[in-house]
Amino acid sequence: MAITTATVAEAETSDNLEGTSRFAWLRAFRRPWTLTGIVIVLIFLVLAIIGPWISPYDPSAVSKAALQPPSPEHWLGTTQTGQDILSQMLYGTQVSMIVGVCAAIVATVLSVIVGLAAGYLGGLADELLSLLANVFLVIPALPLTVILASYLPKTGSLGIILVISVTGWAWGARVLRAQTLSLRKRDFVEAARATGERTGSIIFRDIFPNQIAIIAASFLGTVTGAILTQASLAFLGLTNVTEWSWGTILYWAQVSSAMLSGAWWWFVPAGLAIALLGTGLSLVNFGIDEFINPRLRQAGIGTKKAQRALAKAKRAKIIRRPQRVRTVRDSAGPFNPVTSDVILDIRNLKVDYVGENSITPAVNDVSLTLRRGEVLGIAGESGSGKSTLAYAITRLHKPPAQITGGEMIYTNADGSTTDILSMGENELRDFRWEELSIVFQSAMHALNPILTVGAQIEDALRAHRPGMSQQERAARVIELLGLVGIQTDRVNAYPHELSGGMRQRAMIAVGLALDPEIIVMDEPTTALDVVIQRQIIEKIIELKDRLGFSVIFITHDLSLLIELSDTIAVMYAGRVVELADAKEFYRNPRHPYSQGLLASFPTLSGPKHELTGIPGSPPDLRKLPHGCAFASRCPFAFDKCVTEVPPLFALSGEAEWRQSEAACLLYEGDGTVSGTTAAGRSALDDDAHEMEDAR
Amino acid sequence: MRVLLRRAVFYVITAWAAISLNFLLPRIMPGNPADALIAKFHGKLSPQAVEALRVLFGQSKASLWQQYLDYWHNLFTGNLGISYAYYPTPVADVLGTSIGWTLVLITVCTVLGFVIGTGLGMLVGWKRGSWLDSLIPVTTLLSSIPYFWFAICVVLIFSIILKWFPLSGGYSVIETIGLNWGFIGSAIYYAALPALTIVVASIGGWLIGMRNMMVTTLSEDYVKLAEAKGLPKRRIMFTYAARNAILPSFSSFAMSLGFVVGGSIVTEVVFNYPGIGTVLFKGAQAQDYPLMQGIFLVITITVLVANLLADLAYVFLDPRTREG
């Protein structure tokens, strides 16, 4: 179990390798700390090569200058017998580096062979090789190395290299095996296998190159380990003590009681050299780690700018406001746009991803209103900014994402208003969950694996309702589980013990814990199969009608959204391009992008129609065009579209309760399709799936 | 507890592999160590000792299988042979007097190093992007320092220059060994520097490992959700982030422990500490194979037990492993 968990963690890292080029990891080398590491390692490499030539004395030559501290003649002083320590260090660098690098090469080759073979072959071979690796991992390496080394008395470097590599290959093998296992299931490997490529060539042509980063990391780690082990063995007198290495210098210093005579210069340089080289190698490895695990990279550097801004925002504006008054909401009854008031008013919200020297707008000038009891559906492709918007509304965005403008006005139950963006940390903590909760896409990842479902509901209660007793909390937890349709005896179940649908229900129960006014749902059903999806959606509708909360529902599934929502906002490249009443939107989508989206999705109910897609792909947010972001994919684009960003135009037409709006220059002026292009007019008046003909 | 059972079986296999390796090594290694040893003692060995030595190195007439069975029989009866570095003391006795010192020292230091390192790692990871990140290169340097070299520096500063602590040994010779305050106090006093060395040198590894896991965990959805729930920071940090981030430390405990044990053994030599490490050093110097093999066995078994304990803790901490 311990091993399988580690394996999962190891396997996870590989997912991030894809999508970037195989050699993208070389880019990690540009980080300052990584560069420092590389410079240190290079200096030692050069010294190892030229050491014997530039050393001023014969390292073994005795002289009368015994135990001299550092001086112009002997830069690092001398030993008890008058040997020059600098010369010993220079010769020693060569031996230590040769042992370290060679042992690491042998160990890495071993681990690559075992790891790839175990991961690729699977079955019994995998079982046996993994067992072997795990046995070697658990057996303490140093005592084994000591015994092995002592059987080869006074061995030279070759023996030591063998001994170190025999004990040092297991960790690398284990990591590589996990990698190979996950790569093996990838499409490109499956494809290679299907086309009848030979096993050996699949391993070396398709799998091996994808693991170079991991292998490099494992190699560098082994070099450090090998140099340390060699030094330890030499220090214990188990190597040939007349061959100069850093460890041998320390051995002679120890047996001659250098520290008793205060001869610090005798042992300090060798230890420092080992530590420095080890640090250099580790720094290079951190660079590789951060490449393999992008989460580290993001957190490590983030962007200084964004982090400063965050710190500033934390300090700013901590105004004491009176305790929230909770009033009982009129629940039930379908949403009525005329009688319900605006509960959340988002005005000109802007969210940027702030890089070291670039700013990427992810949410651009978005204005939306949410009324009490309303279901506001936000649709868009991935990268349209819809999830960024969800995080911004809950203020859960992390650097480098940064809210750079706008307001989010929340109307309290008593009618007073608050700007969510100006809330201080404590106020925000009170506001969260009490007024606004969020349901994430994957309940598997959003529930804490080590807490029971009940405990994860209860801690929200405990944090926000200090007055509640233990029994009251327990009763409320049971009530909530009943509400979402989970058997109440599952209260002590851990997330992994529930099925996917049950987990998502549990998520919703957590979201409902404090009876919030607004629930943001970020693709809550995307990860589920269609039948379960249906059940969850029905549950959400039922609960909404019963409890009367408002929902911001985010998904790329337009047909689902049309069925569920009162209002639909379509996002494209960070902007809202169409905002309309759901029924009106379905009957008559106005923005060319909405038409394309609708034409590419089957509806759950309603007439069949031919599915078409939208040609092209979403724009790169870092390089947005000057005009309308959709222009390059739009069949109706005309000259002006390339130069002017269209605002939302109110549209004419018989809207049920709210006027549709679309950000398209076709509707400039009177809100009807302008006569700029005849083709545009005719096509837009027709059904959406006729777009193909218009092109 | 199927998981634990599986792990226990794995450790039994590992122990068997280590013991068999111990049996095989003298038989497959080149050269003739037995003769070398016998020659070294210039006939001062008793005939039984010579015979035992030949048996150890596989020069007996019995079949390899019979030798293997005898080897196991000897193990279970506590007969690990006679030490040559401490001739004529049996290996078991040499181990008996030294294992306690090492066990206490390493256990205390491992726990301290783990707690301090993991705790600091948690903080550094939690405050990622702050000045605390500058601790990372420092701890990297610390963790790259060879234990024994750090020990030498510590001795030079605290024993020789400042004279705050004794130079070497495990207790003051004027005390009688036993459970009396004088002896315990002196043992703690003598252990302070070795312990300091091991703890400081091992903190870095735990710290960096925990920091990276913490950072990785902090971008998990469940931590975001905890934040969205408006939970107190303390609860998010401990129950949501750290409790999950610490799990890999337990699953990679074996390797980390191997490093600490290896480092501690060499550290003991510098302090001439009366533990297993110093004995191993003397054994290696005298090519005392029975003693080295005995030490290897004892350390391996102890490490396996420690790993089993780590697995127990893991099962306790992670409900996902408690199934079945």
Image: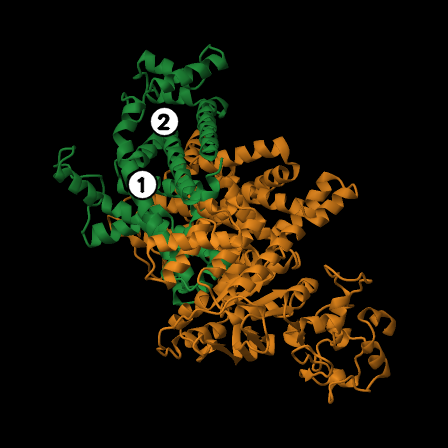
Chain colours: A orange, B green
Residue nearer the viewer, B292 or A405:
A405
Amino acid under disc 2: Gly
Image x and y of residue A532, in percent = 63, 51
Note whether A267 is above or below A239 in the view shown.
below
The residue lying furthest to the right in this view is A693
Image quadrant where one finds the C terminus of chain A? bottom right
Image x and y of residue B232, in percent = 37, 62
Note whether A32 is above or below A262 in the view shown.
below
The residue lying furthest to the top in this view is B61
Q: Is residue B90 left or right of residue A525?
A: left
Whether labels 1 and 2 belong to a single chain: the reply is: yes
Q: Nearer the viewer, mark 1 or mark 2?
A: 1
Q: Residue at x 66, y 65 (%)?
A: A561
Residue on which the image places disc 1: B106
The residue lying furthest to the bottom in this view is A669
Chain letter of the residue beneath label 1 in the structure image:
B
Note whether A664 is above or below B321 in the view shown.
below
Q: Is residue A192 left or right of residue A547?
A: right
Residue nearer the viewer, A284 or B256:
B256
Q: Residue at x 59, y 40 (%)?
A: A115
Res. A87 visible in picture? no
Q: Is residue A415 left or right of residue A262?
A: right
Q: Secondary structure at mark 1?
A: helix
Amino acid under disc 1: Ile
Res. B251 visible in picture? yes
Counting residues from the start of the chain, the first of labels 1 and 2 encountered is: 1
Residue on which the image places disc 2: B294
* Residues packed near mark 2 inside 10 Å, few (<14), some (14 to 19) or many (20 plus): many
- Which of the 4 quarters of the picture holds residue A328? bottom left
* Residues packed near mark 1 inside 10 Å, few (<14), some (14 to 19) or many (20 plus): many
**What distance separates the C-alpha of mark 1 from that of mark 2?**
18 Å
